Amino acid sequence: MRILISNDDGYLAPGLIALADALASIADITVIAPESNRSGSSNSLTLDRPLSLHSTANGYYFVNGTPSDCVHLALTGILLDAKPDLVVSGINQGQNMGDDTLYSGTVAAATEGFLFGVPAIAFSQVEHGWKNVDAAALAARDIVQRRFEALQKPFLLNVNIPNRPYDELTKTVATRLGKRHVSEPVIKMQDPHGRDIYWVGPIGAAKDAGEGTDFHAAQQGWISITPLQVDLTHSVQLSALKEALA
Ligand code: MN
């Protein structure tokens, strides 16, 4: 099995290294990750300048671009003759649940694989801080090894793993995305010259964390797996719109 690994925290992130180490024992891996932390970059592609590919002493590649750039570059160039069987992304520092999935570069790297017809899995650790990241990597390897033959291909899975020791990661559940409240207000500050500057505020708390959601699973200490799709068409609104335009 060939696995392409990327992330949005950058090629030096402990979550990426732990994941690559865990998957190297079961697959041929290629790591292509952003040069710097590109969390929150969503599915953006860099179109206004060329991209450079560099390699590290341990065989990773890094790119001065976004997570989507990395996977795009891999699938349309570097790995043309060695197409991966799976794209994995992460392990992200911090949860990607509910609406986070729209902003997440971690999910976006997986989505880029999915859009090219390759099954893909995004992995995130629920709490910040990398605690038990090696346990999360082992759990991620277990999930990769399940292969999910029963699912339609390509599949796109979003996985959130609680920061717990491996022997406490005993339950894995299928979930739907929950919802968050809107983000906290932007934070207004002044730069050293007295000019107003603004920092985007923290994400909102969970609003729909009901049973069956990714938020609920994480609260129980369970591993959450949500199958994602990309078609944003609202079919009920489509019918209403068709009637309105008739
Ligand atoms: Mn990140």
Image: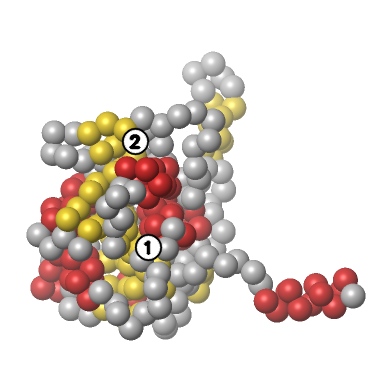
Crowd tier of the residue under label 1, counting other residues whose Cα lies within 10 Å: few below 14, some 14–19, many 20 or above: many
Q: How is the image coloured?
A: secondary structure
- Residue 245 appears in view: yes
Name the quarter where the C terminus is drawn.
Answer: bottom right
- Give the residue displayed 33% in from the left and 73% down from the top: 224
Residue nearest the observer in this picture, 4 or 190? 4
- Give the residue displayed 33% in from the left and 64% down from the top: 121
Instruction: Please tell me whether residue 167 is drawn above or below residue 105 in the rendered image.
Output: below
Q: Position of residue 10 (x, y in %)?
A: 30, 41
Q: Position of residue 54 (x, y in %)?
A: 27, 31
Q: What is the secondary structure assignment of the residue under circle 2? A: strand
Q: Earlier in the sequence, mark 2 or mark 1?
A: 2
Marks 2 and 1 sit apart, C-alpha to C-alpha, by: 21 Å
Indicate the amino acid at tag 2: Val
Instruction: Please tell me whether residue 5 is drawn above or below residue 217 in the rendered image.
Output: above
Camera-near label (2 vs 1) is 1
Per the image, the residue denoted by label 2 is: 63
Which quarter of the picture shows residue 131?
A: bottom left
Per the image, the residue denoted by label 1 is: 118
Crowd tier of the residue under label 2, counting other residues whose Cα lies within 10 Å: few below 14, some 14–19, many 20 or above: many
